[in-house]
Image (tube, coloured by chain):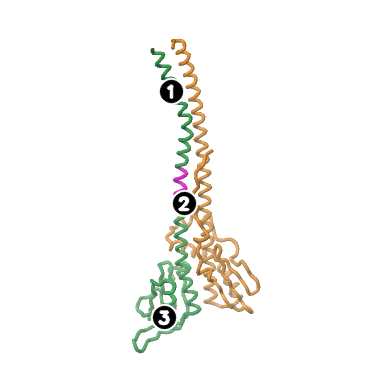
Chain colours: A orange, B green
Amino acid sequence: MDNKKLKILAVVDVVILVALVVVLKTLQGGYEEQVKKTVNEQESAYLEKNTQVLVEQWRSVDQYSMAWKLVYSMLSGAKTEAAFKANLASIEGDKDARFKQISHLYTGAGINDAVQNGIFEKAGLAEGSILVKNEKGNKEVACGKGCVVKFSFAKGKLKNIDYSALVQYNLANTLKIEKPGEYHFE
Amino acid sequence: MNLKNISIALTALVFGLVIMLFMQKGNYVKQGREHYDNTTAKSFKGNSMVLELVNNGIDMNKQTWAIACEALQSVKNSQDMARLEAKFFPATKGSNSIANKTRRFEASSANVIVSTFGKVEEDKKTGVKSLADLQSVDVSVLLGNVAAATAAESEDEGEE
């Protein structure tokens, strides 16, 4: 190859090199930003989904705890429909006691205060009343996800409490933390 | 000769940069994937542990509540109570305090119930004392009022 051709090749190489460096730098910034963005989005979505399960568990434990307290109150105190109403209102209304009971269960299970507070900040307490059915003498109380306690009254007197769902309560069947999916970048 | 070497080197550099150009996307995606995998795996592990621990906690808690609620309906004396405890927790026994006329059942430090009886009975043949006439079942600990239950703590001196 003669000198002239070599010179042209060298010049073309330099031009291509400069162009490539510019393209490389431009794409570099773009890729970095895009990857960061998609990673953040996908991580946040997964973390949010996971946290939601713990939020649901916390609220279920609130309903579960209130239901046990109500069953206990009805068995240990006055066995009337009026007492049921009063007990229910008092249990639902005492938010400090509700938190205390949930927190006690979590502490006993080995969950520290920081984790509990983190969940409580997002979950609060279960919303609405646990009384899900109120037809004359038949009342049903939610005792957590997929759990109902049945109270039946005849002429204002307690006839029966079916709390078998509470005794068999098992959240492991209804709440699950999903494994993370694959990260994808297009 | 010198120009030839420079041209070869420059051409090699051009090819090198072209290869880098194709590789850089893969590198960023790899780094991103590593970050995502680490973060999500940590979250999965931590949250699964919380979920499982609480579910296990509920398991023990519900059985303790079940003893308290069933006791209110069917237990008359400390022997009945012992049978009920054994139904839910075969490996854990409650203990009577004859002096306080109470029976304490502790499935774990967080799951305790204290039953109060009205009478102390003595087996004439064996001299063994037991408690009868269930008055109440204290669930303070289950409600999170640990202090109240500590005050009612009894010494283990009785028989079943």
Q: Amino acid at mark 2?
A: Phe
Which label sits in the foreground, 1 or 3?
1
Q: Residues within 10 Å of mark 2 (few under 14, many from 20)?
A: some
> Does A154 sit above or below residue A125?
below
Q: Position of residue A77 (x, y in %)?
A: 54, 77
Q: Which residue is mark 1?
A: B13
Q: Which mark is residue B79?
A: 3
What's the magenta region? B35-47
Q: Amino acid at mark 1?
A: Leu
Earlier residue among tags 3 and 2:
2
Q: Say whether residue A41 is left or right of residue B96.
A: right
Q: Position of residue B51 (x, y in %)?
A: 47, 58
* Cβ atoms at labels 1 and 3 below 8 Å apart: no
| Same subunit, tags 3 and 2 | yes
Could you tell me which chain the residue with mark 1 belongs to?
B
Q: Say whether residue B119 is left or right of residue A93.
A: left
Q: Residues within 10 Å of mark 1 (few under 14, many from 20)?
A: some
Magenta stretch, overall SS: helix
Q: Per the image, is A91 magenta?
A: no
